Image: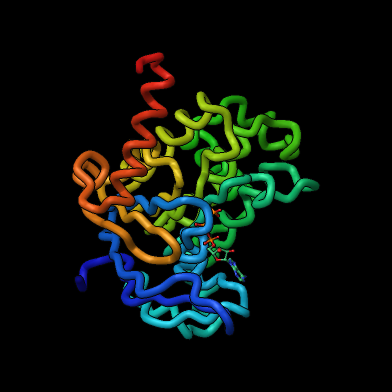
Amino acid sequence: MMSDLLTVRGLTLATPDKVLVEGLSFSIAPGERFGLIGESGSGKSLTSLAVTGLLAPSIRPAGSITLAGKEIIGAPEKRLVRMRGDAVATVFQEPLTALDPLMPLGRQIAGPVRRRLKRKGQEAGRVAVAREVRSLLELVRLPEPERLIRSYPHEVSGGQRQRVAIAMALACQPRLLIADEPTTALDVTTQAEIVRLITSLVEELGIALLFISHDLAVVGQVAESVMVMRDGRMIETGPAEQVLTRPEDSYTRSLVAAARRFDEALEGQP
Ligand SMILES: Nc1ncnc2c1ncn2[C@@H]1O[C@H](COP(=O)(O)OP(=O)(O)OP(=O)(O)O)[C@@H](O)[C@H]1O
């Protein structure tokens, strides 16, 4: 649809000797929360990298990806860089890889804040940037902002690091937030907190979300619509409530049954 924020049509990703993703089509409306589900190696991360124009040079994309009305496939690097600052930002599985180990967290958040203020022609001096950094820390519910600003990544917990990574992604004021397995590296309690935080933030800010996970239960908590992938292909797509409770495809049914058995085991039932 013309009004969609992200439209992927017939996306195929291949190396010279292997097709990794084939004929993928889906779209995300402004403000919509979309879940991409699939087991390891199904092509979820490649799909999200294609959306942000960050594919390895050995992988050739074909088909079409439009984000905020602009074609991504074949776009010059300059346009992709601008789009990554403007339309889309990503939160990855392991926040340590996104963070510089040698730089205090406050300065790391300040980077994207300053770039955004400059891009929008706004005052980007020290005071203005510091004010925005503080309000971002508040937004992601991080306590003790003064200490955090001066801390290095290894001095805070995994959950706090992921909150900082979320703050950095939101610093660009993206229209689409991509969260690629954002909770996989965290313990169960922290996982639930981060999932709730992401859900409430995108709702509060009116941002669309592409949430990627192998975990059906987590995707079910976050997404309004879902797509199930296997071996680089789309297996099933539709409203989350329908796909996750009344799946039509046998592969989706097996995933749902496995997740249910896992839940029952946790509850100590047969
Ligand atoms: N640069 C690359 N060159 C060749 N093959 C690749 C490359 N990157 C990924 N692949 C292959 O593409 C397939 C899909 O990878 P992808 O990372 O998208 O899977 P995924 O669904 O995100 O899995 P995971 O949850 O384990 O990250 C895998 O078989 C992977 O080995």
Q: Quadrant of ligand 1?
A: bottom right
In this picture the colour scheme is rainbow
| Frontmost residue, 148 versus 207 | 207
Kindly tell me whether residue 163 is visible in this rendering: yes
Is the C terminus in the top left, top right, bottom left or bottom right quadrant? top left
The image shows residue 193 at horizontal and vertical percentages of 47, 29
Q: Residue at x 75, y 32 (%)?
A: 155
Relative side of 108 to 163, left or right: right
Relative side of 17 to 177, left or right: right
Q: Residue at x 52, y 27 (%)?
A: 188
The image shows residue 124 at horizontal and vertical percentages of 58, 57
Q: Residue at x 39, y 80 (%)?
A: 71
- In the image, residue 44 sits, relative to residue 109, either above or below, namely below
Total marks placed: 0
Relative side of 253 to 130, left or right: left
| Frontmost residue, 89 versus 270 | 270
Quarter of the view holding residue 66? bottom left
Q: Residue furthest right?
A: 102
| Frontmost residue, 131 versus 234 | 234
The image shows residue 41 at horizontal and vertical percentages of 52, 58
| Frontmost residue, 90 versus 117 | 90
Relative side of 200 to 74, left or right: left
Kindly tell me whether residue 204 is visible in this rendering: no
Is the N terminus in the top left, top right, bottom left or bottom right quadrant? bottom left
- In the image, residue 249 sits, relative to residue 219, either above or below, namely below
Q: Residue at x 56, y 72 (%)?
A: 55
